[in-house]
Image (cartoon, rainbow, N blue to C red):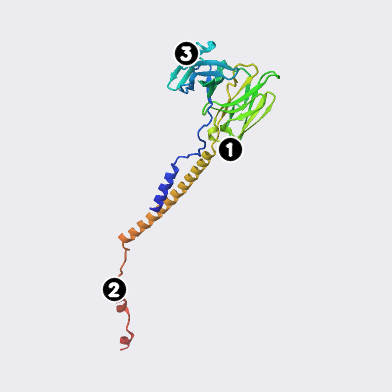
Amino acid sequence: MPWICLLTALLFLLHLPCFPGQNGGENEESTDIISVHEGETISITCSIKGSENEVGTYLTTSIQPVNVVYVSKQNTSYILPALANRTKYSKEGSNLRITLHNVQESDSNIYQCSTYVKTKSYHKKLFGKTTIVVVKGKPSGIVEQAPLYVNPQQGQSVSITCALKASREDERIYYLLKTHVQPEPVLYVSSQNTSTVFPAFANRLEYSKEGEKIVITLHNLWRNDSDIYVCAGVVKNSSFLSVNRSGTMMLIKEGEQADCEKCSWLIYVLITMVTLLFSVLMCCTLYRVDVKKYFQNNPPNTVYEDMSYSVRQHTSRTTNAYSIDN
């Protein structure tokens, strides 16, 4: 019985799933990332403050600032003429939803929501959510990126190279963005080489800039870093965000999972050994029980030989020396 209990417990442990350690928490960065291909539809949602002093809500571009949509509290509106036939808006409770159809590569931009409220002497601008839109069109060759794919172990580092092709005198602004699994900005580097590292890689990122290239190194990678990383940039006098079409696909190998697989193999070996030992013990036990029962149920065959006749015969043939002499 003890061996059966041990075997059952080991089988139970074997079928427990491997749960790698999970890290992370809430995303404190309010910037959204939308990554699509040309011809698709996107929606950007701006929060409406709902204040009595509210004047209206704007959606503007940050690269060469342009008002894309304006909706007043009285529901009068303005839509940028170049986008009028592709842009719709609707109020949904406390939100303003702007939908852009048949997106083009030139729609790649940084969109900023803002609300104007009326104070005693002036209108105050309140900034809302920022949305970076990445539209992947035909390869333009403006933004080059390498490598295309990396598969590091947890805890390792990876370097991504972004190159923004332009004339030497042009200023360049660089971005590195996560665009699919958990869309969020990673790095922003201005033309003056000032930078912002976003919370996802705080204390885990370093970069070096030389000419038209920037090399970004991501350290101490872990499971939630698996994603597609896209280089984007702005060249002087450009009105939109240039992006790399393919990006870098990063898939992190989970160290905990590998350890768990090794653990499973050890459990298999242990169970095999215990099973063999259990089988041997059972065979020995059954053998002893069978032998004992055999001797109990079948008493030994005893052969009795009648020696009386032999004794009598031997006695009659013996000559009595005393009687002969008489």
Cβ atoms under marks 3 and 2 closer than 8 Å: no
**Is residue 278 positioned above or below 251 on the image?**
below
Q: Is residue 12 left or right of residue 229?
A: left
Identify residue type, mark 3: Thr
Q: Position of residue 308 (x, y in %)?
A: 29, 74
To which residue does mark 3 refer?
76
Give the quarter of the figure containing the C terminus.
Answer: bottom left
Count residues near mark 2 (Cα–Cα under 10 Å), then give few for <14, some for 14-19, many for 20+. few
Please name which of the two marks, 3 or 1, marks the residue nearer to the observer: 3
Q: Is residue 222 left or right of residue 92?
A: right
Q: Quadrant of residue 186?
A: top right
Q: Residue at coordinates 67% horizontally, 21% vertically from top-left?
A: 171
Please name which of the two marks, 2 or 1, marks the residue nearer to the observer: 1
To which residue does mark 2 refer?
309
**Alpha-carbon distance for marks 2 and 1?**
100 Å
Number of marks drawn = 3
Identify residue type, mark 1: Gly
To which residue does mark 1 refer?
155
| Label annotation for residue 14 | none
**Is residue 18 positioned above or below 297 on the image?**
above
**Is residue 265 positioned above or below 216 on the image?**
below
Count residues near mark 3 (Cα–Cα under 10 Å), then give few for <14, some for 14-19, many for 20+. few
Q: Is residue 35 left or right of residue 311?
A: right
